[in-house]
Amino acid sequence: MTCEDPIKKFSYWFEEAKKNEPELPEAMSVSTVSADGQPSSRMVLMKAYDQKGFVFYTNLESRKGTEIYSTPKAALLFYWKSLKRQVRIEGQLFPVSDEEADTYFKTRPRGSQIGAWASHQSRLMSNESDLEQSVAKHTEKFAGSTIKRPPFWSGLRLKPQALEFWQDRCFRLHLREVYRLEGNKWKKTLLYP
C-alpha cells in the first residue's frame, strides 16, 4: 500500500494485524528515559489512536510515569510476528484530558478499576499478600458504589514526530519506510535495511 499519511498507513496495517495476529495486536513496547539517561521498556496496550497520537494509560507514579514526567518523550514499537511487520513511533508525550481518562476508566472491568487503586505500581512490595490485602481493602471500600478514577492514574498521548514501517523481505532485504514530521507535513524517506 502506498500512502503519504503515516497515520492512515498505520490504520491499514493495524486492521490487518487485528485480523491476523492471534493475540493483542494492540500490544506495544513503550520506551522511556530516566532523568539520568537510563532507558527502560515495557509492554502496554494502545487504547486509542488518531491524527493527534497514540494513547495508553498508566499509574503516573510508576517508574514509567516518573520517567515521562522528567523526560516527556518516548518510543513505541508494535511487532506483528504473523505479518512480519513492525512499526516504530517516536514523539512527545502529553496527558489526555481528565474527561477522556474518566470516560476510558469507566469502560474497564471492575477488577481492573480496583487494581488501579490497589497497586502501588513499580514500588517495592514485601510479599504477595501486600497486594492481596490492598485489593481486599479497596474491594470493601468500593462495595456497592461506582469507582472513580484515581487521581494518580491517567492516559498519555504520544504525538508522533517519526514513524518507521518495517516489512520483512527475503535475504534480510527488508523494506523500511520512514515518515518524519517537518512543520505540519510528513516527509517520507527510505532506509537501507
Image (cartoon, grey):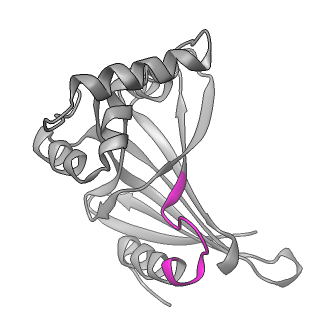
The picture places residue 111, in percent across and down from the top left corner, at: 36, 41
Q: Nearer the viewer, residue 20 or 111?
A: 111
- Side (left or right) of 93 relative to 148: right
The picture places residue 98, in percent across and down from the top left corner, at: 14, 38
The picture places residue 10, in percent across and down from the top left corner, at: 44, 73
The relative height of residue 41 versus residue 176 in the rendered view (above or below) is above
The relative height of residue 37 versus residue 113 in the rendered view (above or below) is above
The picture places residue 108, in percent across and down from the top left corner, at: 30, 50
Q: Nearer the viewer, residue 136 or 88?
A: 136
- Side (left or right) of 88 relative to 154: right
The relative height of residue 22 versus residue 1 in the rendered view (above or below) is above
- Side (left or right) of 98 relative to 167: left
- Side (left or right) of 83 relative to 24: right
Residue sitting farthest toward the bottom = 1
Residue 139 found in image quarter: top left
At 61% from the left and 9% from the top, the residue drawn is 126
At 38% from the left and 33% from the top, the residue drawn is 115
Whether residue 152 appears in this view of the structure is: no
Span highlighted in magenta in the image: 18-28
Was residue 139 drawn as part of the magenta stretch in this picture?
no
At 37% from the left and 59% from the top, the residue drawn is 181
